[in-house]
Every structure is written in structure tokens, then in C-alpha cells.
Amino acid sequence: MSLIVQKFGGTSVADTEKIRAAARRAIRAQKQGHRVVMVVSAMGKQTDVLLKLAAGVCERPPAREMDMLLSTGEQTSVALVAMAIHDLGSKAVSLTGGQIGMKTDNSFSKARIRSIDTRRIERLLEEGNIVVAAGFQGIDDDLNITTLGRGGSDTTAVALAAVLGADACEINTDVDGVYTTDPRLLPEARRVDVISYDEMLELASLGAGVMHSRSIEFAKKFSVPIHVRSSFGDRDGTMIVAQAESESAAVSGAALTKDEARVTVLGVPDVPGMSRTIFNAIAAQKIAVDMVVQNVGAEGKADVSFTVAGDELDQTLRAVESIVDSIDASGVTHDAEVSKVSVVGLGMADQKAVAAKMFRALADAGVNIQMITTSEIKISALVPREQSAAALRAVHEGFTLDQRPADAKTWKEIKAEAAVEADVHDVVSRLQNDALEALTLTDIAFVGGQARVTLDGVLDQVGIAADVFEEIGQAGIFIDMIVQGFDGEDGRTSVSFTTDEANLEASIKVAEQICEKHAMRGVRGSAGITKLSVSGIGLRSHTQVGTVLFDQLAEAKINVEMIATSELQVNVVIDSAQADTATRRLKAAFADALN
Ligand SMILES: Nc1ncnc2c1ncn2[C@@H]1O[C@H](COP(=O)(O)OP(=O)(O)O)[C@@H](O)[C@H]1O
Ligand SMILES: N[C@@H](CC(=O)OP(=O)(O)O)C(=O)O
């Protein structure tokens, strides 16, 4: 008999009527012949209500007690859903995280799943029950209640679907699928039939709240197809699978992280080990850092800028300020009023001029770009928060995301073409280990023969990035990484990009023309650099990846010249002479995580 996992988010169990509707949906599936496991979140905004309650009694509540409190939201809703099922004449049993055998580590509020013992669920299903499992929670080795982080019920659902070998994992929510961007922010957003794990992973971590990004890490690792659909209708929604909807589209979605904050550490001595000290201090707080840009200025001093989630700014500043003196930096600045707008697409790597198109769309909408970072399948720009809505609309329009690409395929078509199914034995053996959410790396490799070009003293004005990259594109120069950093001192920024060594001369020539036209300070370029990449799943959320990487490079006295991070890859640019040593060291340091 087939088994389906049906997750109902807070909005889908927000009141008694909705709870009864969710119960009816599960009963219907059971009557159609499926065994049904429901995963349920706290009712409506109950988790926020509990957070406020805690804030009323304690300024900084202990994390353990916070998890104890927050888990009650789900405990209430599972009991109510099970009661509603009984009332409708079917059998159901509600279970907490501990009762479903969801073992996690002990990082309260961000716990990671270690293992799930499915025996009890299987027995209850055998007896004809609908199992109603609490999302978002687990227990650690000492039987403390833990939670998986905001939005974590999606991860519970996908993890259960994986370990139970479910035929389907349905995410029932208040939208009828995944859209090209949040439809609440942009009504013209388009629902897609299919989106790839990689794209969804990036979009989710960039602010597409429809899915918890860790649930997609899980789904990718264990090949769980996810069906995102509306709780309130019967139409098919969006399938999240390995394949993308279109092969030709460079960009398939856009996302906005509204509450970002920028932090800049000024005047950092440009010697190996400084980034390590800064980022270790932050990683120790389990804070994920994004958009890291290092500008090497005059006198061998660098300004290191990065962004963090707005609600983690205070904690980040405390961590950074505690080490500023020890690294001899001159100070720390921050901006709490910024937002990050990003575009994501698997087709991006093969297409020139995607970045220029994004920057032009922003320039035409009068949006000033403060920082830029790129990775293989995403481009992010930091913009003033008051311009964030305009920025999202501009990029969505710029890439005509409201229109279905001509070669877009439906899930049926993709499924029919998919030649090989996942290797079942491989998946089962991985599900047997006791570190289900452990870091998984697929490769550590480098590409040599690269060059870097930097334009210094770029005026912080609308349209400059668009001009720069359009002109470089017109000169036929293929570029890889782009970073634009915030220059704390004089309101100027510097823009760097990497390209093949063969393009260095041509790139400098074009850059010099641009420099003159826009009254910039100057152009620098150097060959002999290498891009070193660590690839895997969920690299940003496993904050130790950055720590280990910086540790290893610093110990070998290797200077990191540029950094680009995504969920799928961490890339650093280093001197080619050190590429072999760096790769060897990283392979040894990450041996346990490498597949
Ligand atoms: N790309 C996107 N596609 C669909 N919905 C999105 C996207 N980005 C953000 N969202 C938002 O996610 C919401 C659903 O997530 P959430 O409110 O957490 O639901 P639930 O309570 O079911 O977990 C939608 O109402 C929508 O506004
Ligand atoms: N209740 C938790 C977990 C969760 O996943 O909720 P939802 O499915 O409503 O996003 C939260 O609000 O974070």
C-alpha cells in the first residue's frame, strides 16, 4: 500500500475550520488507499505569539527553555488535528517529535536531525491510524526537546518521507505552488510546474519562505520528490525534483531578503589569517554569513564586508567587536537598512551578460547597488531597503519571469524522459547512518589560469555596475565571479571580476576606458590566480565549512583574494602557486564529509 506524507503549515491549521479541512484531506487520502502520515505546524502565528510571551519575561531566554516553549505550539495542533479526525469517524494518533523518534543534536533552536526511528509510526499505520506528527521538533540524547529552526516543519516532513520511503511528500500550504517570486510581494509572479532542488535551495535560503531550505537539502540528498500545493484546492501544484523546468532560461526565480544588515570591518591588515579570525568569531555563534567581499585598498589594508540576517546583527556586532583589536583592524561600521535582491537559475552559468542584464534592470528603476556577489547559479545585489520592492519588480520584469519559457516542460514530460531512477540501494544505505543532516561534500577542485581585474574608487551611483558589465560583455569577454564591495571610508566602492588569463589584457583595456569615463581611481589586474571550489549540499547552513576552510588556508599562509558562497559551492580565489597545497589540505580536512 502506498504511503504519503502530507505536511500542513501554520496557515493551513490556523483555526478550527481549517483543522477540520486538513483532517478531511488526510481521511480522503486514506480512503483512496494510501497510508497517511501528517506533519503539522503550530496554528497560524502561534510560534510568534510564544516568542513574544518569552520576550515579556526574559530579555535573553535560555535556548533550551525557548525550545521547550516553542514546541508546545505543534503539540497543541497535532492533538487538535487527531481529535478532528476522530470526530470525522477515522482513527488517528498524534505524536510529538520525541515520540516519532526524531533524534537531533543539541543545538537548541537550530538542531539538526541525526536519526529517526520509524518503528512506532509503522506500527500505528499498520493498525489503520492516520499518524499526526508534530513538525519542527525533536529530542537530543538527554531527552531535551529541541527545535529545527523557523519553518522547520518542512524539514520534518521531507525527512519522514525519506526514512519511511514514502511515495509522495506533499507540502500543503496557502499558495498553490512555487512561484517565480513571492506572489504576496509581486502579483505578476508566475507559478512554475517544476523547479530543481538546486534552484529551490538557493531561493529558499534567499528568502522564498514557501520552503525551509534545509528540507530541500534533505530532499536532494535522498532524492525525495516534493509536491507543493494548496491546502484549499485539488489542483496540482509544483514539483521540486532534480530537473529544471526549462533548459533555455538563464533565470528561473527571484527572491528578496528584506531584513539584511551589512557589516564592514575597516582597515584589516591584508595578511593570511585575518578573515579566519573574523569569520570564526561569527561562526562560533552559528550565524550564517552571506555576501562576503574583501576590498584590498592602499597600504595593504583591506575592508571586509559581509551581510547577515537583520535579526542577527546585534549578535554579529558583538562577536566582531570582540576581535577587532586582536587583528589590528581600525573599526567596524554597519547598515541595518538594506535588503538583498537575488536572481537564481541553473542556466546562468552558460550564459553571458546575465549579470549586466540584472544591473541594467536595477539601474533603469533608479536602484543603487551597494554590494554585489555572484556564484554559479545566483547573483545577489544589496540595495537600500526603501528601494527593495522596486528592485524585486525590476529584476522580475527584466528577466520576463512572468512569462513561461517556450521550452518549459511539465512534470509529466520530465518524468517520462527521466532515464534513471535514483539508486535505491545507495539512498537506503545513506539513510541508515545516524547523521542524516551531516555535511555532504561532492568535490574539492580548482580551476587555474584565471585573472582578476579590479576597478578602484568606483562612484557609488546608480547605473555604474550596469555600464561596466555591459561594456565588458560587448567586448566579448566572458567573466566568472563578480564582487562589488562597500568601501567604508569615502562612499566609493570597488568592483572586481575574474576571467580567463587569456582575457586579461583585453579586460584591462576595457576597464581603463570605463575608468576614465566614470572618473574612477584606477584599474589593477593580475594573472596567475586559481579558483578553488568546495562543492556539496547546504554549505552555507553548515557554518563550519567556512571555518575549516579559512583555518586550513591560514595555517598554510595562503591569502584569500576573493570569496563567493552559495548553498552548493564555496569558492575562493588564491594564488595559483598555492593551489595544490590548498586542495590537498582541504581534501584531508574534509575527508569525512567527502562522498
Ligand atoms: N517563490 C515563492 N513561491 C510561493 N510562495 C512564496 C514564494 N516566496 C515566498 N512565498 C510565500 O510563502 C508563503 C507560504 O509559506 P508559509 O506562510 O510559511 O506557509 P505555511 O504556513 O504553510 O508553512 C506564501 O504565502 C508566499 O507568500
Ligand atoms: N511553527 C514553526 C515551524 C513551521 O514550520 O511553521 P510553518 O510550517 O507555518 O512555516 C514556525 O513557525 O517556524
Image: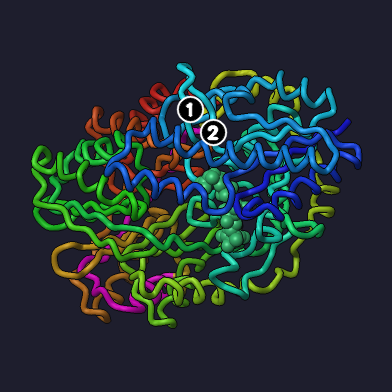
Which residue in the structure is indicated by mark 1? 145
- Residue 210 visible somewhere in the drawing: no
Q: Which mark is residue 137?
A: 2
Residue at image coords 14%, 69%: 490
Q: Please state which amino acid type lies under the numbered disc 1.
A: Ile
Residue at image coords 16%, 57%: 297
Q: Magenta stretch?
A: 443-472
In percent of width and height, residue 471 lies at 40, 75
| Residue 148, magenta (yes or no) | no
Q: Is residue 509 above or below residue 139?
A: below
- Within 10 angstroms of label 1, few (less than 14), some, or many (20 or more) residues? many
In percent of width and height, residue 111 lies at 46, 32
Q: Tell me the quadrant of the picture where the N terminus can be found.
A: top right
- Residue 412 visible somewhere in the drawing: yes
Q: Please state which amino acid type lies under the numbered disc 2.
A: Gln
Q: Are marks 1 and 2 in contact (CB under 8 Å)?
A: yes
Q: Tell me the quadrant of the picture where the C terminus can be found.
A: top right
Residue at image coords 85%, 28%: 128
Element type at mark 1 = strand
